[in-house]
Each structure stands twice: as structure tokens, then as C-alpha cells.
Image: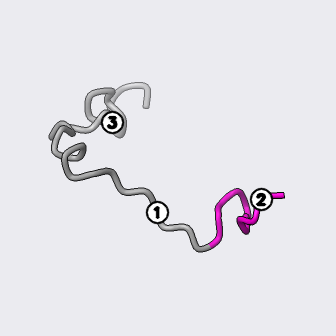
Amino acid sequence: MPEKNIVAGKAVGATPFEPKAEQMALWPDISGNVINGQGERGEGF
């Protein structure tokens, strides 16, 4: 058996993932939610 302690599908004591700064610099200034119209209010919503 693995020696990791896993609770609710997450490793206990694990640090959260954070991408490298070089990767984050490539992210666009606009989010996918804005592109897809998530959160808009209009007819039929």
C-alpha cells in the first residue's frame, strides 16, 4: 500500500499546485467565462 495519507481524495499535508511564473505569464487577460458568456443576464436567463 502507498504510504500517503489520503482523506476525501486529497493527500494530507500536500501543498497546492502552483504553475511556474513562465506558464502564468502566458495566460490571457480575459477568462474563459467572459468568452463563453457565463454570468451574463439577458432574455431567457
Whichever of callouts 3 and 1 sits on the residue coming sooner in the sequence is 1
Indicate which disc residue 37 carries: none
Front-lying residue, 8 or 34: 8
List the residue tagged with mark 3.
Answer: 33
Residue numbers of the magenta segment: 1-12
List the residue tagged with mark 1.
Answer: 16
List the residue tagged with mark 2.
Answer: 2
Residue extending furthest toward the right: 1
On screen, residue 5 versus residue 37, left or right, reads right
Q: Are marks 1 and 2 in contact (CB under 8 Å)?
A: no
Secondary structure, mark 2, is loop
Is 30 magenta? The answer is no
Residue drawn at 71 percent across, 65 percent down: 4
The nearer-to-camera label among 3 and 2 is 2
The picture places residue 16, in percent across and down from the top left corner, at 46, 63
On screen, residue 3 versus residue 29, left or right, reads right
Residue drawn at 59 percent across, 74 percent down: 13
Give the amino acid type for the residue marked by disc 1 in the picture.
Pro
Residue drawn at 21 percent across, 52 percent down: 21
Is 8 magenta? The answer is yes
Colouring: one colour
